[in-house]
Image (cartoon, rainbow, N blue to C red):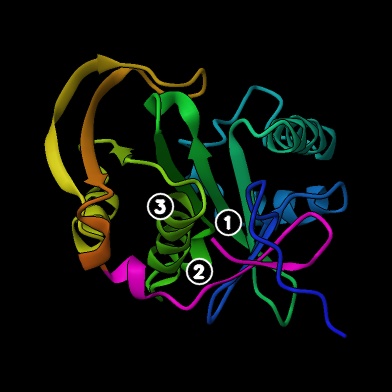
Amino acid sequence: MNSPTPTVAHPPYLLRTPRLLLRCLQPEDAARRKEAVDSSGEHLDLFFPPSPEGRPSLDSHAAQIRRFRGNFDLDQDRIYGAFDPESGRMLGENYLLKRAGIAALEVGYWLRRDAGGQGIATEMASAMVKTAFEFDKVLRMDLMCSPSNERSAAMARRLGFTFEGRLRDRQLAAHHVRGDILCFTLLSTEYPRTPASQLQLEAFDFLGRPVTP
């Protein structure tokens, strides 16, 4: 007799969309992450600013993954690696950040340079939006981007986010360059009318069991 599908008690550790595998990062992902960043050159300088020593080392990536995994396991900020399900190649990362406040999450992402222009970033972000509203039961989601990041601003609008304003002279993380930020938001009452709500998504818990909201 098959056991019933458990209702989610903790955030999903693994997500499947039509083209992507999104999961909590593992130690062996450090090399995959380094390859994705190194091959993207200046494209990812906002997320991985070069130092006098050059691009982040394998140990640096491993240290970040260790910290990300710790936060994930403690139900704090969640970082999902985005992978091609066939080749295992790392395509980027998704973020669900708690700095948005109570009953809210901020969505963020980065995508390797050679994976752009295929709708992958939109699929990644849609998976995060669906997960946040259906599993985390948030009331609001934020999406922040630089005024010069026209692609992210356009994607926010495609996903149904509303432009709330230009936040002046902000620095949300240590690696960010201080400056103005565009703020977009999406409310739980608006979510059912968005493309993300229609995304095909499978979710699995820490033990690999399928879970439902």
Q: Of residues 122 and 91, which is closer to you in this image?
A: 122
Tell me which residue sits at (81%, 75%) in the image: 3
Tell me which residue sits at (47%, 21%) in the image: 173
Element at badge 2? helix
Q: Nearer the viewer, mark 2 or mark 3?
A: 3
166 part of magenta stretch? no
Q: CA distance from mark 3 to mark 1?
A: 22 Å
The range drawn in magenta is 195-213
Query: Up-down: is 67 above or below 184?
Result: above
Q: Quadrant of residue 36?
A: bottom right
Label 1 sits on residue: 92
204 part of magenta stretch? yes
Q: Find out whether the residues at labels 3 and 1 contact each other: C-beta distance under 8 Å.
A: no
Q: Quadrant of residue 178?
A: top left
Tell me which amino acid carries mark 2.
Answer: Ala
Q: Which label was assigned to residue 212? A: none
Q: Tell me residue 115's x, y (percent).
A: 50, 69
Q: Which label was assigned to residue 115? A: 2
Q: Of residues 32 and 158, which is closer to you in this image?
A: 158
Q: Is residue 200 left or right of residue 197?
A: right
Tell me which amino acid carries mark 3.
Answer: Phe
Q: Tell me residue 75's x, y (percent).
A: 65, 34
Tell me which amino acid carries mark 1.
Answer: Gly
What residue occupies the far top of the structure in this picture?
169
Label 3 sits on residue: 133
Q: Of residues 34 and 105, which is closer to you in this image?
A: 105
Q: Nearer the viewer, mark 3 or mark 1?
A: 3
Element at badge 1? strand
